[in-house]
Image (cartoon, helix red, strand yellow):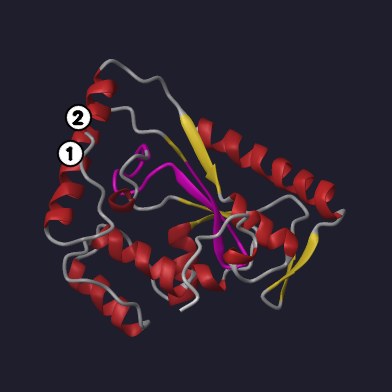
Amino acid sequence: EIYTLSLHDALPILIVEAARGAVGRLEFDFGGERVDLTPPWPRRDLLDLLEERLGQRVHPTMPIAELRTVCDTNGVHYEPSWGPGKLVFELYDQALMGQTLGPVFIYHYPTEVSPLARQTLEDPTLTDRFELVIGGRELANGYSELNDPDEQAKRFQAEAALAAGGDAEAPPADLAFVRALEYGLPPTSGIGLGIDRLIMLLAEVPAIRDVIPFPIMRPEA
């Protein structure tokens, strides 16, 4: 977890300095909401936030039938093939994230929806993964890399089974990556920052097409 913590510290500096350099301020209007980038940015556990939003505790170890009932109660769509970790994530994605103004780091995402992230030491159903949420959108995704080839192979197999069952979001198994892990990977972390979404925030525009330099051209008809 020490590796993801260092990313927590570095990312606010990067974004704050980008805002100051680009527009000279840290407050922005984003979809009619006032977003203040002034640090420090809080760090919140995903399950704690969900409990506050839903009025009850959910966890990836809960029976699927119970989680489906929670989804039904809160108007969250789900597919019959989704497991408990995916259901918990969809509760977050559909019922919580869009209402989270931020900036806030949300951490401990379910393992089921984090195939490349290392599990936490305390709970194998959760991972050392975080997202930075600003204005109801994910602006960055970071995690400690899974470096166990056997565990990675198991996760790829699970993803492949979902893909075979018709899940369009499930990626194919990357056996070459598993083989590379067998040679050894030291403790590693990484982060992906959505540059287009950051520019949307700084430019105070609601649509990503407004900030893409070369959008896909389509016939006028």
Residue 220 appears left or right of 202: left
Query: What's the magenta region?
Result: 118-142
Residue denoted by label 1: 154
Residue 103 lies, with reference to residue 73, above or below; the image says: above
Residue sitting at x 58%, y 64%: 208
**Residue pictured at 43% horizontal, 67% vertical:** 93
Expressed as whole percent of the image width and height from the top left, the position of residue 149 reads 24, 27
- Is there a contact, CB below 8 Å, between mark 2 and mark 1? yes
What is the three-letter code of the residue carrying label 2? Asp
- Residue at the location (33% across, 27% down)? 147
Amino acid type at circle 1 is Lys
Query: Could you tell me which secondary element the residue under label 1 belongs to?
Result: helix
Tell me the quarter of the picture where residue 62 sits.
Answer: bottom left
- Of 211 and 25, the residue lying toward us: 211
Which residue is painted at 58% across and 55% down in the image?
214
Is 216 or 184 nearer to us in this picture?
A: 216
Whether residue 104 is visible, yes or no, is no
- Residue 150: mark: 2
Residue 128 in the magenta stretch? The answer is yes
Indicate the quadrant where residue 79 lies: bottom left
Relative height, residue 80 to residue 202 (above, below): below
Task: Give the Cα distance between marks 2 and 1.
Answer: 6 Å
Label 1: how many Cα within 10 Å (few below 14, some 14–19, many 20+): few
Confirm whether residue 50 shows in the render.
yes
Q: Residues within 10 Å of mark 2 (few under 14, many from 20)?
A: few
Q: How many marks?
A: 2
Q: Position of residue 126 (x, y in %)?
A: 35, 48
